[in-house]
Image (cartoon, grey):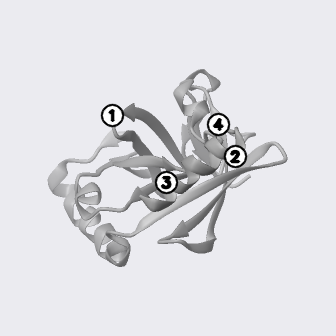
Amino acid sequence: MIFEVGALLLAALTGQSAPDPLAPAREGKLQCTAPNVAKKKCLAMSRYSATPGGYRNTTIVVISAAPLITMELASDARIVGDAVCAQLRHEDILAATIAVEGQAMPAADAAPLIDRMAGGMKEMFGKTVCSRFRVEGEAMVSEAEIDGAPQPDMTMKFIWVGPEDGYAVGWEAG
């Protein structure tokens, strides 16, 4: 909270507003992470929808390339200064859905996989993950920090794409 107020005061004092990292999302664009532009594939795709308290981030991420297994989960996000921040919550993972080759997996069949994913992420629950975006060539780069500590191993390239651009979640080396 103190950081948010400080960032707003700094913006007001300098006469500049903080950059809006989710402006493309408000225009209907999707965040395509680790894009394969030639094949129009994304390792993950995220949609940000405005809510009264910030944003709802719905992400579909590849778990396995062959067969294509994806997990869809939703979490709350907010803008803090020039970063997009969210807290990873156990209940968000447990509410996730799994699809195989685009077909929803029955909840009873998906439960063991979701439980395994949740178990592997348990040390992250309750921590705040913030990402700052910067331009790098034709793409953007998302640089993450967890509870304020930089996480260089979580740096990922992404592009903003429109629904009409034909991108899909999947993974093909290329």
Residue at 46% from the left image edge and 51% from the top image edge: 61
User: Which numbered tag is attached to residue 4?
Assistant: 3
- Choose the circle earlier in sequence order: 3 or 4: 3
Q: Which residue is mark 1?
A: 52
At which x and y percent is residue 108? 14, 55
Of tags 3 and 4, the one toward the viewer is 3
10 Å neighbourhood of mark 1: few (<14), some, or many (≥20)?
Answer: few
Can the viewer see residue 15 in this picture? Answer: yes
Q: Which residue is mark 4?
A: 160
The correct choice, above or below, for 154 with respect to 9 in the image is below
Q: Which residue is mark 2?
A: 36
- Choose the circle earlier in sequence order: 1 or 4: 1
Residue at 53% from the left image edge and 28% from the top image edge: 26
Image-based side of 140 in relation to 50, left or right: right
Image-based side of 1 in relation to 29, left or right: left
At which x and y percent is residue 146? 50, 70
Amino acid carrying label 1: it is: Pro
Of tags 1 and 3, the one toward the viewer is 3
